[in-house]
Image (spheres, helix red, strand yellow):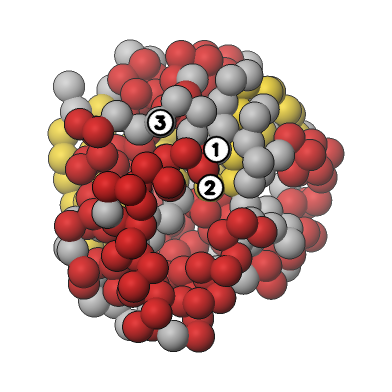
Amino acid sequence: MSKDGSVTVDDVDIRYTESGSGPTLVFVHGAYVTGSLWDDVIARLSAGFRCVAPSWPFGAQSAPVGAPNLGVAAAGRRIVGLLEVLDLRDVTLIANDTGGGIVLAALGDTALDFGRVSRLVFTNCDSYEHFPPKSFAPIVKLCGSSARAGAVVMRALATGPGRSFFASAVTRHGIPAERQPAIFGGFMTSSAVRREAVRFSADLNPRYTLAATGAIAEWNKPALMAWGSQDKMFPLTHAQRLAEAFPNGQLRTIEDSSTYVMLDQPDELATTVTDFVRNS
């Protein structure tokens, strides 16, 4: 059984769900979605793990957070800060999409202490110069140049056709309509949250992920790339590059899956994560 909680980190209220017991897994989703993205995988993992799934302020939070800073560096501080506030230790941090880029950027931030993290798992995500990925870059550029124009694009993405377009870009098998309110959260329902999505998007920049290059090479703890093999935004070559750069990097490919491997192939992702944590 899962329970809901909230914690204040960096003056921002972050809601999360927690379920299961055992070694701690903390999940990081990407832009415009909530922690519910991980529900299928958590349902499979919670029998053997303590699963903590926050809804980070990445543009789909249930209500606007009003923070003056919603950029990449602040997002990284909040991830590390949540581990500290909840006193989570020996954590396996599992990230996807934009969230993976933010975790990498945080790893490269010398002001942040990753001592509570024992393992890293990256599913299909941003890295190096691909932050944002090429196909998403025009939206980021627009958000950076005009908040009003960015809000128009976000509103279009939040419509039924927009969500269908989004789902086709990140999944092989779509996002069921009945799950979309939970997964898209405030992005789907709140113009104020979408304005914060614009602010968040405007700061996505490869300078953050490229700055993590040295930190990646120095991360001696286990790191897994659990990668959907049929992803046009984040192809398998991105995972291979990361796996080779981490001193203890591993690559596991997951077939018939795109960016949202947790939706496309939850059984295989859960098994892959379990094997990695148990054996590292």
3 vs 2, front mark = 3
Q: CA distance from mark 3 to mark 1?
A: 11 Å
Look at 29% across and 65% down and name the residue there.
Answer: 155
3 vs 1, front mark = 3
Look at 33% across and 62% down and name the residue there.
Answer: 156
> For the residue marked with disc 1, what is the amino acid?
Thr
Percent position of residue 74, x then y: 45, 71
2 vs 1, front mark = 1
- Residue assigned mark 2: 97
- Residue assigned mark 1: 259
First in sequence: mark 3 vs mark 2:
2
Q: Residue furthest front?
A: 161
Circle number at residue 57: none
> For the residue marked with disc 3, what is the amino acid?
Gly
Percent position of residue 230, x then y: 65, 30
Secondary structure state at the residue bearing disc 1: loop
Whether residue 167 sits left or right of residue 214 in the image: it is left
Look at 35% across and 83% down and name the residue there.
Answer: 148
Q: Are marks 2 and 1 in contact (CB under 8 Å)?
A: yes
Secondary structure state at the residue bearing disc 2: strand
Secondary structure state at the residue bearing disc 3: loop
- Residue assigned mark 3: 174
Q: CA distance from mark 2 to mark 1?
A: 7 Å
First in sequence: mark 3 vs mark 1:
3
